[in-house]
Amino acid sequence: MAHRRLFLWSALLFAAAGIVAGGWVLFFRPIGVQVLESQGNVAVQVFGLGTVEARVASKVGFKVAGVLAELKADHGDCVAKGAVLARLDTREQSARVGRANANIDQAEANLNRALAGVAKAETNYANASSINDRRQALVKSSNVSIESAETARAALDIASADLTLARSDVEVARAAIKDVRAQEQLESVTLDLHALAAPYDAVVIARQKELGTVLAPGEPVFTLVDPRTVWVLAYIDESKAGEIEVGQPVEIVLRSLPAQRFHGRVARLQIESDRVNEERRIEIAFDRIPGDFHLGEQAEVYITTIRLPRALLMPEAAIEDLARARGTVWTVEDGHLARRQVALGHRMLDGRIEITSGVPDGARVVARLVGGLRDGRSARIAGIAGP
C-alpha cells in the first residue's frame, strides 16, 4: 500500500514538473522568428493583359471599278511607300485617254481656225473702214451719192460685227481647249487609279482578292499595317491604374515567347475606360518592335509606376487586422515580441505590402506568423526571411 502511494505521488510530481516545464517552454522560453530586411531600389509594378495591335492599319482598294488584272504583293510582304501592289485591266480606260487626247488636237485646230478668222475679219474691217472714210468725204463734195455713202457705212458695220464674232469664236475655242484638257486630265488620273500603290512603308497582313475578280469602287484588296506603329493595347484594373503615367517603363511578355521580355513605354492613356469590365485602356509602345510580330497575340505587361529607394516589404499573410492602408504586425524589440499597428503603402505583384510607418527605431518586423507569438514573450532572431 505504501509503495502504491509512493508511486502515485511520484507520478503526480513528474506530471506537475512536466506541466511546469511545458509552461515554461510555451510562455517563457525565447521563440525563434525570422525577420524582414529592408530592400533597395524596389520596383512597384502594375500588371495587365492586352493584345498586340497596330496603330496604323489600312484596308486598301481601288477608287474605281474594274477587273483585277495583276497582283504584285501577297501576305507577309514588306512594301515601300509608292510601290504598286496591284493593277486593274486598263484597256478601256487607255482608249478613253486616247480619245481625250484626240479631242485636244481637234480643239487646238479649231482655235487656229478661229484665229485665222479673226485675221480675215480684221482685214475686211480695215478695208471697209477705208472705203467708208473715202465715201463719206466724197459725199460732202457731191462726188458720190448719199446712197453710196450709206452703203459704205453699212458695210463697215457688218465688218465690225464679223470681227467681234470672229474674236468671240477664238474665246469659245480657247474655252473648249480648257475643257478637253481638263477631261484628258480626268481620264489620265482615272487611268492612274487603275494602279494600287502602298500609301506608306507597310507589311501586307492579308490579301482579300484574286486575279480576275470584278471589283467595285473601294472594295478592299489588301490589308496593310505600318510596322513602326505596332504596339500593345493593355487593359488595367481601374483600382490599380491611378499611378500610371505616359512615359513609364514597361516590360512586355508575348504569349509565344514566354521566356523573353521586351521593353517599352506607356504611350497613351485612353480617356474612355471599359464600362463593363471596369478596366482602363493603356497603349504601350515597344522600344524595339519584334521582327516577327503577330497582331492579336496576347501579351502580359508589367508597368513600373515608381521605384522605391528603400522599402520594408511584408507578406500579406503575416499582417493581422488588415484594412485599407493599415494593419497589425509583430516586432522584436529589445529581445521581446510586441504588436504594432503600422501604415501600409504600395502593394507588390507577389502579394507583399510596403510598411511605411509604425515600426519603432531598432525594432525588427517578424516575417511569418508562427505559433506561440505573444506580446512580451522573449524572442530571438533565427534568420532573415527571403523575398
Image: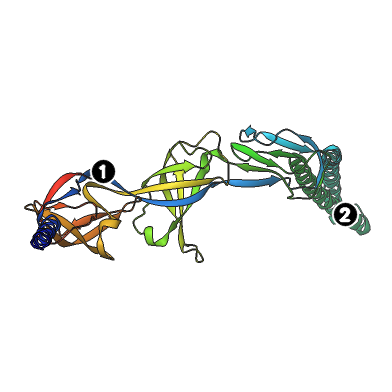
Foreground of the two, 129 or 167: 167
- Reading the image, the residue beneath label 2 is 158
Q: Residue at the spot x=85%, y=45% of the render?
A: 121
Can residue 239 be seen in the rendering of this structure? yes
Foreground of the two, 179 or 386: 386
> How busy is the neighbourhood of tag 1: few (under 14 within 10 Å), some, or many (20 plus)?
few
Can residue 137 be seen in the rendering of this structure? no
User: Where in the figure is residue 89, as x and y percent of width and height?
Assistant: 83, 38
> How busy is the neighbourhood of tag 2: few (under 14 within 10 Å), some, or many (20 plus)?
some
Quarter holding residue 189: top right
**Left or right, 322 with reference to 216:** left
Foreground of the two, 126 or 111: 111
Q: Residue at the spot x=71%, y=45% of the render?
A: 61
Residue 386, labelled with which disc? 1
Q: Quadrant of the N terminus?
A: bottom left
User: Where in the figure is residue 102, as x and y percent of width and height?
Assistant: 86, 38
Q: At numbered mark 1, what does the secondary structure look like: helix, strand or loop?
A: loop
Q: Amino acid at mark 2?
A: Ile
User: Where in the figure is residue 315, as x and y percent of width and height?
Assistant: 28, 53
- Disc tally is 2
Camera-side mark, 2 or 1: 1
**Left or right, 371 with reference to 197:** left
Q: Quadrant of the C terminus?
A: top left
